Amino acid sequence: MIKLLYLLDAVDGIGGTEGQLLELLERLDRRRFEPHLGVFRATADLEPLAALASSVRVFGVPRLLHPMAALKLIPVTSHVRREAFQIVHVFMNAASIAAPLFCRLGGARVIGSRRDMGFWYTP
């Protein structure tokens, strides 16, 4: 069985990316994959996704420009290593920028998914 960690910034409503992840979790073949969920920040909207994951971990990572952000990302490495995740699939801007290095140091392969980037790059 392949252990997957889906890692994202936060769940602020079930919009495009969150909706796609929800659909993915609902349709994932549980005979082949064991999905887990990790978020940088907890929100009330996390529940629909959390209900479909084998476990949920909140890392407490503030905004990336926060002075404590790098220190808060170190536990991502130990979590990935300890739980022996084979694949980490990152979503959203902050997770896509910051998490891959820490996940690779933990021994996992990393997949990045970034959607509708025009929103972030439009003045």
Image (tube, grey):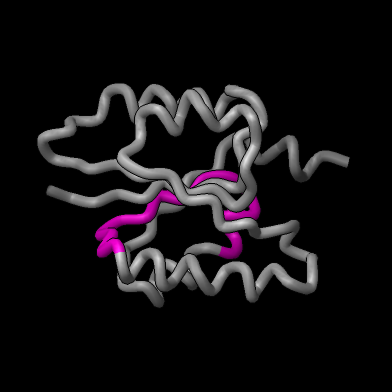
Estimate the x, y position of residue 1 in percent, counting from the top left.
Answer: 12, 48
Estimate the x, y position of residue 8 in percent, counting from the top left.
Answer: 54, 46
Residue 94: quarter of image: bottom right
Estimate the x, y position of residue 79 in percent, counting from the top left.
Answer: 40, 65
All told, the count of numbered labels is 0
Residue 35: quarter of image: top left
Q: Name the residue located 56 percent from the left edge and 37 percent from the top edge.
A: 115
Relative to 35, is 93 on the left or the right? right
Give the magenta-colored segment's residue range: 83-98
Q: Name the residue located 69 percent from the left edge and 68 percent from the top edge.
A: 69
Relative to 44, is 26 on the left or the right? left
* 121, 57: nearer the viewer: 57
Residue 123: quarter of image: top right
Is residue 84 within the magenta segment?
yes
Q: Name the residue located 54 percent from the left edge and 51 percent from the top edge.
A: 58
Relative to 54, is 122 on the left or the right? right
Q: Residue furthest right?
A: 123
Estimate the x, y position of residue 113 in percent, counting from the top left.
Answer: 48, 45
Q: Name the residue located 65 percent from the left edge and 36 percent from the top edge.
A: 43
Check the image and report above or below for 59 versus 18: below
